[in-house]
Image (cartoon, helix red, strand yellow):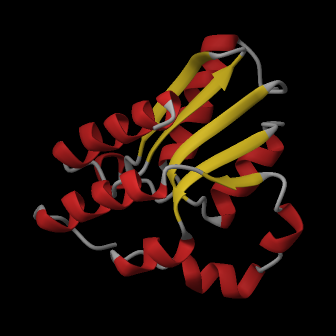
Amino acid sequence: MNKFMKIAIEEARVGIGKHHGGPFGAVVVKNGEVVGHGHNRVLKNNDPTCHGEVDAIRKACYNLDTFDLSGCELYTTGEPCHMCLCACMWANIEKVYYGCTIADNGKIGFRDDKFNDIFSGREKLKDYLIECDREECLKLFDEYLQLQHTVY
């Protein structure tokens, strides 16, 4: 398993263990070092924009004292929704590695597919979005389903 995806999975476990939100953890990596990590905090913060990717981007920008994450990559347990995908692009993140797919997100109760149908266009980003360690991330999603959780 990729070492950065492993960190993203552990970050997601922290979040679901504390009932902060869904099983979405993310890390931002620059030059082989984690510069920001985060998890879904939608429920904790009452903030529908605080997805794992956004949380990790905010922390990376703070840690690096910049709004420009050129030279960085992001690893996330679930394929980013359009909001997070655009946040990655606005931050100049160079590649995004994801575990579970948009369809997998839907199987555990998230409505990413609804927005994906509206906005579409992911096929244009095939070199930007790269699937990574899906089986390990599916195990995380199974763990999430076994927990008592709020569907939102």
Q: Residue at x 48, y 79 (%)?
A: 111
Please say if 116 is above or below 86: below
Q: Nearer the viewer, residue 88 or 1?
A: 1
Task: Judge whether residue 124 can be spotted in this image.
Answer: yes
Q: Is residue 137 left or right of residue 19?
A: right
Task: Judge whether residue 50 can be spotted in this image.
Answer: no
Determine the image quadrant of residue 84.
bottom right
Q: Nearer the viewer, residue 123 or 93?
A: 123
Residue 148: percent from the left, percent from the top?
10, 64
The quadrant the N terminus occupies is top left
The quadrant the C terminus occupies is bottom left
Residue 147: percent from the left, percent from the top?
12, 61
Q: Residue at x 30, y 54 (%)?
A: 140
Residue that sits furthest to the front in the current view: 1
Q: Is residue 52 left or right of residue 125?
A: left
Q: Residue at x 34, y 54 (%)?
A: 23
Residue that sits furthest to the right in the current view: 124
Q: Nearer the viewer, residue 131 or 75?
A: 131
Residue 20: percent from the left, percent from the top?
27, 48
Residue 99: percent from the left, percent from the top?
51, 54
Q: Is residue 54 left or right of residue 125?
A: left
Tell me how many marks there are.
0
Please say if 95 is above or below 31: below
Q: Residue at x 72, y 48 (%)?
A: 87
Please say if 125 is above or below 31: below
